[in-house]
Image: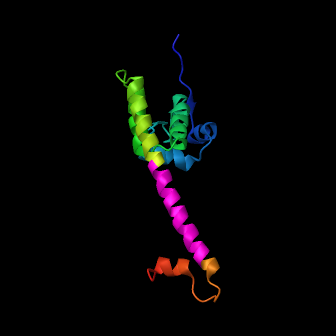
């Protein structure tokens, strides 16, 4: 007996995955989600597996992976030669990237706090060090 694959509309896929239809279309345009089959009346129909793939994409985004990195992870997922060590290497590279961004955000935070303190310290009420900095005057 042949198993019939479930076919989901774009709305059904979006609801099951907890995203908007525009996100589904975006994932298609960027190649993260394969182009779906279409009915005779041109409606997109997705297999049940598309929900799992969208969830994979969303979870990878939550961990900080870019869409390009997610493409690589999806390729690794289907490549039988991929080892856990290969995936771990990608994870460590992402950890390093995140830690670098955290350091950069801390520097930005300190610089902004300093400028905000200078604004507060200005008792004459004339000018604003933060705005002057942004304008390139200090």
Where residue 58 appears, as percent x and y from the top left, is 54, 40
> Does residue 31 appear in the picture of this structure?
no
Residue at 54% from the left image edge and 77% from the top image edge: 130
10 above or below 105?
above
Name the colour scheme: rainbow
Q: How many marks?
A: 0
Where residue 108 appears, as percent x and y from the top left, is 50, 63
> Does residue 36 appear in the picture of this structure?
yes
Residue at 59% from the left image edge and 41% from the top image edge: 14
39 falls in the magenta region? no
Q: Main secondary structure of the magenta part?
A: helix
Residue at 62% from the left image edge and 41% from the top image edge: 18
What residue range appears in magenta?
100-118
Extreme-left residue of the structure: 81
Residue at 48% from the left image edge and 42% from the top image edge: 42
110 falls in the magenta region? yes
**Left-right relation of 123 to 133:** right
Where residue 135 appears, as percent x and y from the top left, is 46, 80
Q: Nearer the viewer, residue 17 or 59?
A: 59
Q: Nearer the viewer, residue 67 or 118?
A: 118
Where residue 89 appears, as percent x and y from the top left, is 39, 32
Q: Nearer the viewer, residue 131 or 59?
A: 131
Q: Nearer the viewer, residue 131 or 66?
A: 131
């Amino acid at each position: 007996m042949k198993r019939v694959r479930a076919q989901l509309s774009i709305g059904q896929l979006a609801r099951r995955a907890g995203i908007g239809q525009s996100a589904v279309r975006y994932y298609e345009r960027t190649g993260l989600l394969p182009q779906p089959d279409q009915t005779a009346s041109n409606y997109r129909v997705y297999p049940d597996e598309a929900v799992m793939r969208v969830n994979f994409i969303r979870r990878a985004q939550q961990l900080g992976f870019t869409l390009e990195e997610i493409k690589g992870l999806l390729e690794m997922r289907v490549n039988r030669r991929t080892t856990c060590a290969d995936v771990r290497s990608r994870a460590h590279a992402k950890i390093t990237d995140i830690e670098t961004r955290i350091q950069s955000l801390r520097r930005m935070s300190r610089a902004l706090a300093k400028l905000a303190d200078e604004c507060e310290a200005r008792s004459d009420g004339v000018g604003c060090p933060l705005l002057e900095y942004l304008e390139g005057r200090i």
